[in-house]
Image (cartoon, helix red, strand yellow):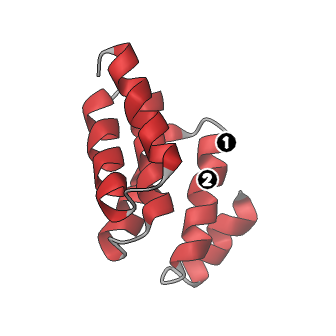
Amino acid sequence: IEQFEAAAKLRPEFLDLRYRLARLYLDEGRLEPARDELRSITARRPAFVDAHVSLGMAHYLMKDLGGARAAWVEARRLAPADVRVSAYLALLQRVGG
């Protein structure tokens, strides 16, 4: 994580690098930094489907079901055939979100 953080500081415009950093944060359970990084990425590259999907997961893990829904609905709008998005939205329905 430290190496990715250093690289992201050197090259903040490399959104793919920042996305990998956000995924590492998610994997480590560092949900707020992951969410913040993913919000920044989706603001700068709105069509980055994987970032929207991951942002939804960060919100979901933070128990922010509304935020998860918003991110996954946007991902579905961008990639209607993405089965991950359909599965995550179905999960939300099962948990009452």
Q: Is residue 52 above or below residue 4?
A: above
Amino acid type at circle 1 is Asp
> How far is the residue under mark 2 from the one under mark 1?
6 Å
71 on left or right of 81: left
Q: Residue 62: tell me if it is visible.
A: no
- The answer to whether mark 2 and mark 1 are in CB contact below 8 A is yes
Asked which quadrant contains residue 45, the reply is bottom left
Residue 88, given in percent of the width and then of the height, sits at 45, 35
Quadrant of the rendering where the C terminus is positioned: top left
Describe the element under mark 2 as helix, strand or loop.
helix
* 83 vs 73, nearest the viewer: 83
What crowding class fits label 2: few (fewer than 14 Cα within 10 Å), some (14-19), or many (20 or more)?
many
Residue 53, given in percent of the width and then of the height, sits at 46, 51
Residue at left 59%, top 83%? 10
Residue at left 48%, top 54%? 82
Asked which quadrant contains residue 90, the reply is top left
Q: Which mark is residue 23?
A: 2
For label 1, the residue is 27
